[in-house]
Image (cartoon, helix red, strand yellow):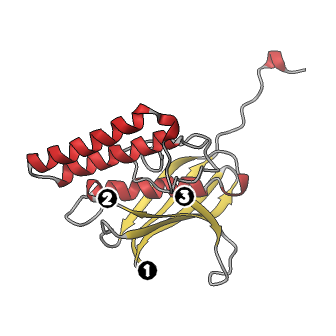
């Protein structure tokens, strides 16, 4: 389900407000930025039907309605991750379906100075691995275990890639792996287990 241009525009402005709150340390500068954002919000609200976005997020194909704090185009606390799908190429030569997202994280996602908060790193990996767990039309599955290794700091204000894929499937179990890279360097790695629910049996009264 796609997000309306008005909803996505409003979400982006709200992200700008969040960024101003953590970036501006002078009240006068913050007040000026708040007035600018408020004016933009008011202008859009005058007639939501005419709001346009030149680069809207593409509708997600594996989740009908994305409201998550990791990748939703209408959730202002989400980075957001615009997750894409591909089959890994000849360099890997394994034909593995992969989910990935390229994202630049601003100051509101900071943990240590200049670095993305470790919890946000975990959030992004959980989201991308969860997306990859549904590759090729597999039925829904949910996170059972997620283990992270932080190899280096994930930088703010730089493009980082979050990737995930299925390493193997055993019945209802999907074993996942993924990583975050910045300038080709792995900053965090993840492995996890996603499990598909057991099929529910029909009530006895409904059986023929």
How many numbered markers are drawn?
3
Nearer to us: label 1 or label 2? 1
- Residue 109's x, y, as percent? 30, 55
User: In the visual, does 28 lie left or right of 15?
Assistant: left
Instruction: Tell which residue pokes out farthest to the right in this image.
Output: 208
- Sequence-wise first label, 1 or 2: 2
- Residue 7's x, y, as percent? 47, 39
Instruction: Tell which residue pokes out farthest to the bottom in this image.
Output: 91
Q: In which quarter of the image is the N terminus?
A: top right
Label 1 packing within 10 angstroms: few (<14), some (14-19), many (20+): few
Nearer to us: label 3 or label 1? 3
Q: Distance between the residues labelled 1 and 2?
A: 19 Å
Label 3 packing within 10 angstroms: few (<14), some (14-19), many (20+): many
User: In the visual, does 42 lie left or right of 196?
Assistant: left
Nearer to us: label 3 or label 2? 3
Instruction: Write down the residue under mark 3.
Output: 83
Badge number at residue 164: none
- Residue 67 seen: no
Instruction: Tell which residue pokes out farthest to the top in this image.
Output: 205
- Sequence-wise first label, 3 or 2: 3
The residue shown at (58%, 53%) is: 58
- Sequence-wise first label, 3 or 1: 3
The residue shown at (49%, 51%) is: 53
Classify 94 as above or below 204: below
- Residue 154's x, y, as percent? 33, 68
Q: How far apart are marks 3 and 1 (CA)?
A: 19 Å
Whether label 3 touches label 1, CB < 8 Å: no
Badge number at residue 184: 1
- Residue 196's x, y, as percent? 64, 45
Instruction: Write down the residue under mark 2.
Output: 118
């Amino acid at each position: 389900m796609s997000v309306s241009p008005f909803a996505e525009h409003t979400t982006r402005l709200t992200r700008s407000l969040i960024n101003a709150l953590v970036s501006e340390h002078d009240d006068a500068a913050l007040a000026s930025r708040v007035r600018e954002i408020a004016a933009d919000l008011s202008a859009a609200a005058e007639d939501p039907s005419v709001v346009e976005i030149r680069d809207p997020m593409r509708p997600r194909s594996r989740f009908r309605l994305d409201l998550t704090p990791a990748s939703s185009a209408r959730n202002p606390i989400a980075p957001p991750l615009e997750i894409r799908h591909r089959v890994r190429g000849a360099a890997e030569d394994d034909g593995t379906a992969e989910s990935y997202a390229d994202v630049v994280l601003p100051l509101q996602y900071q943990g240590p100075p200049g670095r993305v908060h470790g919890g946000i790193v975990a959030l992004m990996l959980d989201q991308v691995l969860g997306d990859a767990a549904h590759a090729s039309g597999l039925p829904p599955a949910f996170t059972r275990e997620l283990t992270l290794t932080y190899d280096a700091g994930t930088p703010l204000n730089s493009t980082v890639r979050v990737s995930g894929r299925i390493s193997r499937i055993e019945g209802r179990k999907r074993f996942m792996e993924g990583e975050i890279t910045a300038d080709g360097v792995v900053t965090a790695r993840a492995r996890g287990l996603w499990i598909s629910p057991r099929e529910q049996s029909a009530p006895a009264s409904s059986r023929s």
